[in-house]
Amino acid sequence: MAFENDWSLMASENDWSHAFQKYDFDDAYFNDVGSSDACEDNDDDWTYSECEREEKAEFNLVNPIVEEMYAYMQRHFDKQPMRISTLTGRSYMDEIIKGNPAKCDEMFRMMLELLEHLVYELARHGYLRDGQGGVNATQAVAILLYILGHNICYRFVVDRFQHSTETVSRHFRWVLQVVHAYTKHLIKPDPNVMGLPKHLQVNKY
């Protein structure tokens, strides 16, 4: 029994040695797979430049995906708030209203009494009303006057009132349309005038 086991063991060893003789482990297939030298030493039609083009194409395919993943991580996982000033837009307007009236004239090119009257008139005619958001009617009108009075872009207003660019842009356009619609209550013909004065009865008017 022991003799048979020894013979079977020898036979299996011979089979393995015979199988190993079929392969040359010094061949470049076993030693240089995946390396740049394989492209140089390979005798086939596959040249090094073709390998380089293949690697470049793979890089061009993967690189945009990695960049998009990194940008996604920054947007959604590594977000850092920008509007962190303790003086919010509402607090800033409270400071303007309760402070020196001359500051309102400097910031919004309008005296405080006129600003409050404008907000009241727009609300009385139903054009403005305080919503549930962080921008009330007074602040919305102030944003419009701040941009028009100083001829500045949204970025400065965003930092001043501590709102997003989308919020500032939306309220600016909204109040601008409101003021334009309100002009019909200010500019209207005199009912007592039957016709135009003589100096206006020309073609250019």
Image (cartoon, rainbow, N blue to C red):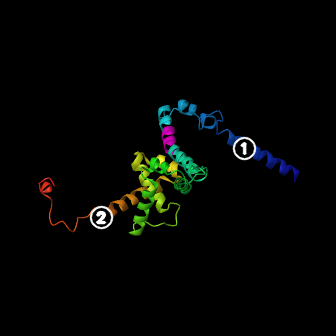
Query: Does the magenta run of residues contain 59?
Result: yes
Judge depth for marks 1 and 2 and give the one in front.
2
Query: Residue 19 at x, y = what percent?
Result: 68, 43
Residue type indicated by callout 1? Trp
Of label 1 and label 2, which has the lower sequence position?
A: 1
SS for dot 1: helix
Q: Is residue 176 left or right of residue 62?
A: left
Characterize the magenta stretch by its predominant secondary structure.
Answer: helix
Number of numbered markers = 2
Q: Residue at x 37, y 57 (%)?
A: 176
How crowded pointer 1 is (Cα within 10 Å; few <14, some 14-19, many 20+) is rated as: few
SS for dot 2: helix
Query: Does the magenta run of residues contain 38?
Result: no
Q: Quadrant of residue 197?
A: bottom left
Please tell me which residue lies in front, 166 or 26: 166
**The C terminus lies in quadrant:** bottom left
Please tell me whether residue 189 is drawn above or below residue 43 in the rendered image: below
Which residue position holds label 1?
16
Q: Residue at x 12, y 57 (%)?
A: 198
Q: Disc 1 versus disc 2: distance between alpha carbons? A: 101 Å
Magenta stretch? 54-61
How crowded pointer 2 is (Cα within 10 Å; few <14, some 14-19, many 20+) is rated as: few
Which residue position holds label 2?
184
Residue type indicated by callout 2? Lys
Q: Is residue 52 left or right of residue 2?
A: left
Please tell me which residue lies in front, 4 or 26: 26
Q: Are marks 1 and 2 in contact (CB under 8 Å)?
A: no
Q: Which mark is residue 33?
A: none
